[in-house]
Image (cartoon, grey):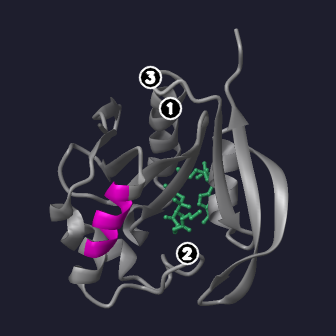
Amino acid sequence: MTPTLAAPGIILRPLVLADAAALFVALGDVEVQLYRQQAAHAHVGETERYIADTLGRSRAAWAITVDGGEALGRLALRVPEPGIGEFGIVLRAAAQRRGFGLKALALAEGFAFGELELHTLRATIDAENAASIALFAKAGFAQTALLPSHERTKLGLRDGVVMEKRLRQA
Ligand SMILES: CC(C)(COP(=O)(O)OP(=O)(O)OC[C@H]1O[C@@H](n2cnc3c(N)ncnc32)[C@H](O)[C@@H]1OP(=O)(O)O)[C@@H](O)C(=O)NCCC(=O)NCCS
């Protein structure tokens, strides 16, 4: 189950299919989707299928909101192997650079290291996605690997950067 998590100025609540129209604002935007694997969504139905897929594959999936209402973006946490969590995050253009990404990661990290007892959090990012690399660096993640020709996206065969944060043992 995905918990609702809150901090000043942000509420992460469970992502639901009904968030499709709001999330389409982000996922239908060519610029926002530039470094993500999928092309910009052409219609809301595509975003609804994407949400269903995210919910099926994630241990937790949140709508990023100010007050529990409209989804400005979404944060997903997959657990691909025991102890390890992998984040995926996207925000609509108008909500970027306002601190939501950093706050969302901090909230989800507390849940992942705490309740889920994960020991490592990870993001695999297109090597040219400077905004995302800078976000995770600011959140305390460090680059642990460069993956040449990691993934084929609409931009072609792309290098990836792995950023990780480990639980600090007391
Ligand atoms: C990556 C993304 C989630 C960042 O979220 P955000 O809410 O805009 O980030 P924040 O406002 O919390 O910024 C935190 C820090 O990250 C860095 N950062 C964020 N956006 C940046 C940008 N465009 N250029 C350079 N640094 C950036 C800065 O260090 C920033 O701190 P500062 O504003 O005090 O300088 C957002 O740009 C996005 O949705 N991009 C498109 C989708 C995407 O590429 N997702 C990642 C796939 S791995």
Magenta residues (range): 49-56
Residue count near mark 2 (Cα–Cα under 10 Å), binned few <14, some 14–19, many ≥20? many
The quarter of the picture showing ligand 1: bottom right
Residue count near mark 1 (Cα–Cα under 10 Å), binned few <14, some 14–19, many ≥20? many
In the rendered structure, the answer to whether residue 150 lies left or right of residue 73 reads: right
Please identify the quadrant where the N terminus is shown. top left
Q: Assess mark 2: CB under 8 A from ligand 1? A: yes
The amino acid type found where label 1 is placed reads: Ala
Q: Give the image location of residue 85, x and y in percent.
A: 57, 42
Asked whether 53 falls inside the magenta stretch, the response is: yes
Q: Assess mark 1: CB under 8 A from ligand 1? A: no
Marks 2 and 3: which is nearer the front? 3
| Distance CA(mark 2)–CA(mark 1) | 23 Å
From the image, tell me which residue sits under label 1: 112
Query: In front here: 69 or 120?
Result: 120
Do residues under tags 1 and 3 come within 8 Å of each other at their CB atoms?
yes
Rendered residue at 56%/81% (across/down): 34
Rendered residue at 48%/76% (across/down): 32
Please identify the quadrant where the C terminus is shown. top right
The quarter of the displayed image where residue 53 is located: bottom left
Between disc 2 and disc 3, whose residue precedes?
Answer: 2
Q: Say which mark, if any, is on residue 36.
A: 2
Query: In front here: 7 or 89?
Result: 89
From the image, tell me which residue sits under label 3: 115
Residue 141 visible to the viewer: no
The amino acid type found where label 3 is placed reads: Glu
